[in-house]
Image (cartoon, rainbow, N blue to C red):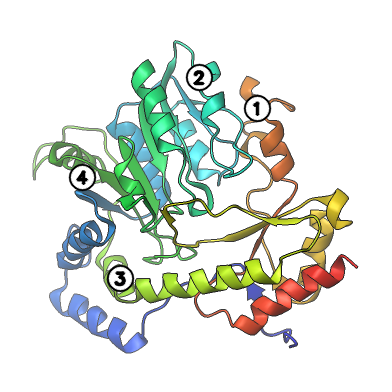
């Protein structure tokens, strides 16, 4: 199978509902003239997401980064926060915007998540919270992290941007930690064009979060907090309501693509897929592989360029590490050699294309190119 130059194969594409259905929602919004500020689609989406995701309270945001920034504000986090260098920059940027010092620790080589064994040695008198990331939709070691947090009196805010609908032993991963933050960006499994959310566990916290995202207004005339404008509008919410109708089918297709990749890549020396963890229900947001040069015979970057020659655009996700960006590399915790696992994996990872509409023949072609390039 040949890929035409006009048909680039990207890592991900958005899930789009039928246009006719979306037009019905748009006409309803247009007729109501209620475009934002907690409209009926916003309210309906919050309710539907709580039911689908198995959580008690959810607060919608215009994007995931503002949700992260606000989550830290909601729990009044200060000082230092232990986090991972192996993530999208938004997780650490949210700390910086709150005048909080990120403290990076190494990752687990199996899951690529924050390594619980490295957390305790990074705790100082200034540490107030832990900000782990469920990387590629694989849950962190939530029980171990909770035990550490409880022992030292720390808050836990999970970056759950990759874990839409993910469960551990039947329990939604969003129910762990003090708060969980989600992204509904167009590249995510579930999207509202741009968008995000904070999941919390009680009505008082949700009310506090809702005040923060609306300039700190308590009512029409009273401002009680220095809040921000981070509200989701009605068009975004309508998109989300439609997405929920198709999300189960989309995740099922992603699962089949993931399994097809695993089968197609079997036996290629130096190429490894991340382990499927027992008792986890995944949403398959990405399909990362690790390229070990001694076994494969080529570097990760060489394979990355080879795929591009075939119009297949993988993503070195996450590369570089957050700790290697100029903004953060001056931190003591970011110094080279302190996080050997993360430093190794960031040089090996490529995320291959995966989205519901990806043809099986393309999956087979990608696997064949990877296999043939080793020869």
Q: State how far apart marks 4 and 1 are (Cα).
A: 34 Å
Residue 255 pos. (x, y %): 50, 69
Mark 1 or mark 3: which comes first in sequence?
3
Q: Nearer the viewer, residue 144 or 40?
A: 144
Location of the N terminus by quadrant is: bottom right
Q: Is residue 8 visible?
A: no
Name the residue located 23 percent from the left edge and 79 percent from the top edge: 25
Q: Which is more foreground, mark 4 or mark 2?
A: 2
SS type, badge 3:
helix
Mark 4 or mark 1: which comes first in sequence?
4
**Would you name the residue on which mark 3 appears?**
244
Q: State how far apart marks 3 and 2 are (Cα).
A: 39 Å
**Would you name the residue on which mark 1 appears?**
334
Residue 242 position (above or below residue 222): below
Q: Residue furthest top?
A: 125
Mark 3 or mark 2: which comes first in sequence?
2
Residue 69 position (above or below residue 196): above
**Would you name the residue on which mark 4 appears?**
210
């Amino acid at each position: 199978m040949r890929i035409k130059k006009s048909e680039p194969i990207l890592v991900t594409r958005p899930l789009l509902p039928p246009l006719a259905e979306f037009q019905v929602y748009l006409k309803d919004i247009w007729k109501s003239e209620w475009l934002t500020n907690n409209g009926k689609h916003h309210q309906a989406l919050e309710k539907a997401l709580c039911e689908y995701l198995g959580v008690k309270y959810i607060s919608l945001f215009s994007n995931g980064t503002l949700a992260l920034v606000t989550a830290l504000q909601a729990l009044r986090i200060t000082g230092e926060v232990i986090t991972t260098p192996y993530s999208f920059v938004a997780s650490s940027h949210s700390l910086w915007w709150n005048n909080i010092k990120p403290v990076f620790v190494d990752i687990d080589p199996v899951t690529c998540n924050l390594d619980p064994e490295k957390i305790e040695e990074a705790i100082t008198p200034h540490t107030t919270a832990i900000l782990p990331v469920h990387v590629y939709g694989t849950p962190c070691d939530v029980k171990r992290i909770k035990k550490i947090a409880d022992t030292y009196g720390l808050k836990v805010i999970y970056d759950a941007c990759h874990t839409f609908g993910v469960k551990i032993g039947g329990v939604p991963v969003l129910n762990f930690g003090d708060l969980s933050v989600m992204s509904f960006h167009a590249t995510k499994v579930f999207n509202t064009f741009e968008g995000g959310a904070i999941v919390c566990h009680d009505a008082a916290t949700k009310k506090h979060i809702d005040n923060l995202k609306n300039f700190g207004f308590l009512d029409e005339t009273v401002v009680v907090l220095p809040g921000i404008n981070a509200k989701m509008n009605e068009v975004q919410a309508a998109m989300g309501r439609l997405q929920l109708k198709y999300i189960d089918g989309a995740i099922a297709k992603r699962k089949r693509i993931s399994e097809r990749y695993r089968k197609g890549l079997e036996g290629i020396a130096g190429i490894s897929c991340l382990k499927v963890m027992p008792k986890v229900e995944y949403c398959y947001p990405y399909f990362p592989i690790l390229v070990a040069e001694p076994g494969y015979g080529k570097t990760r970057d060489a394979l990355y360029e080879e795929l591009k020659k075939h119009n297949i655009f993988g993503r070195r996700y996450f590369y570089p590490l957050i700790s290697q960006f100029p903004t953060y590399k001056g931190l003591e915790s970011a110094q080279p050699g302190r996080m050997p696992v993360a430093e190794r994996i960031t040089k090996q990872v490529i995320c291959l294309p995966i989205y519901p509409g990806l043809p099986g023949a393309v999956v087979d072609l990608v696997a064949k190119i990877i296999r043939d390039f080793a020869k």
